[in-house]
Image (cartoon, rainbow, N blue to C red):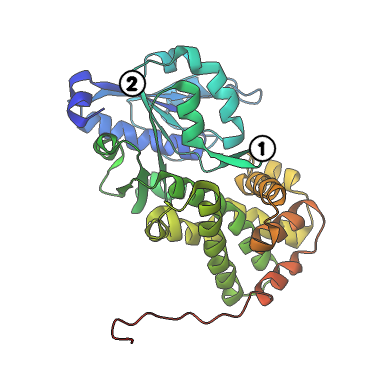
Amino acid sequence: MTAAAAAATGMRIAVLGAGAWGTTIARVLAQNAASHDDMFYGTVDLYVEPIASDVNLAKTINSAHENPRYLPGIPLPDNVHASSDLLSVVSRAAILVFVCPHQFLGTLLDRIAAHVRRDAIAISLIKGLHAHDARMRTMSGMIRDALRIDCSALSGANVADQVAREQFSEATIGCRNVAHAAVFQAMFQRPYFRVQATTDIDGLEACGALKNIVALAAGFVDGLDLGTNTKAAVVRIGMEETMRLARVLFGDHVCDRTMLLSCGVADMITTCFSGRNRRVAEQFVRTGTPFDRLEAEMLHGQKLQGTLSAAEVHDVIVARGLTARFPLFAQTYRICFQGAPPRSIVDVLVQQPHEVVVAHHPDAA
């Protein structure tokens, strides 16, 4: 759908997921819906999954104009409308914005598939990959196949509360259909939230998922008090393994330049120095507390994406006989799930192969 077509229909936006990032994005989208009322419907719907510990969260959001559970202290525009009626929210939406944890996406798609408008489009803000039969599928691919609509993706160095406080951030939109890039840029672009577009959607989503594994390794380094030099080595090797695995999974069309966008190196740095995966992994080392308990204590029961991604990636590289090519990913899994000592992450760094990078000079004979 082109920007002109969007303007003609006054497209209604639905955000599926009301965690910190989903709520933050609903705030961004509501601001743009108000300022682009010739293009988007004035109200942005925010789907809130009912939970036993807070069955009235949607009502609280609508009355207080704040999500006190996941984004406390951040005011929401009046045109954010929270609802726990999933099918009603989905059936009237022209644009679906997916922001749920990646392990719940399959169930969500099963619930809504029969209720999605045929002319709808979607965008995934979910950072994860789905492992199946020694293959990995992107979140946008799962959405596209299940709903039979086009799906793009957004990823970048975006700590939710910083975006919510309107501190400057960048993000990258991956679109298979270039015409949709203008629609999504109008939806997301704010003075404090700059978006670029790329057609390398597979590379974008691989970076978004795999950086969470690298962040766990960075957290192990912090828990061991090994310093920034060691953590920088983890980040560098993590970037290398990320691009290598992206090409194994999705082919040689994955572009090196993708790593230079916000979805690549910027997101990797932010996640490895300030994200929740790094923070929880550090406490795992310092306290010896299992990850499930740390999730309950530090994340209000929300699940870490890094440990889930580490397990899924490990299954795939083992099935393909590729563990030797991805030593950082493999050892991070062993520390998380097989009792390997956290200090063993250093062995991965020490045992990196020695190589000489040869530059190609144009005047060389």
Q: Residue at x 70, y 54 (%)?
A: 321
- Quadrant containing the N terminus is top left
Residue 130 falls in image quadrant: top right
Seen at 48% across and 34% down, the residue is: 141
* Mark pair 2, 1: CA separation: 33 Å
Q: Can see residue 167? A: no
Secondary structure, mark 1, is loop
Label 1 CA crowd tier, 10 Å (few <14, some 14–19, many 20+): few
* Mark 1 residue type: Asp
Q: Nearer the viewer, residue 146 or 325?
A: 325
Label 2: which residue?
94
Relative depth, front residue between 284 and 142: 142
On the image, the x and y values in percent for residue 19 come to: 52, 35
For residue 185, side relative to residue 285 (left or right): left
Q: Which residue is mark 1?
A: 133
Give 178 or 166, whichever is nearer the viewer: 178
- What residue is at 53 percent from the left and 23 percent from the top? 109
| Side of 195 where 48 appears, left or right | right
Q: Residue at x 67, y 72 (%)?
A: 225
Q: Where residue 65 appears, x then y in whole percent? A: 41, 29
Q: Amino acid at mark 2?
A: Ala
First along the sequence among labels 2 and 1? 2
Compared to residue 158, the image places residue 185 above or below, namely: above
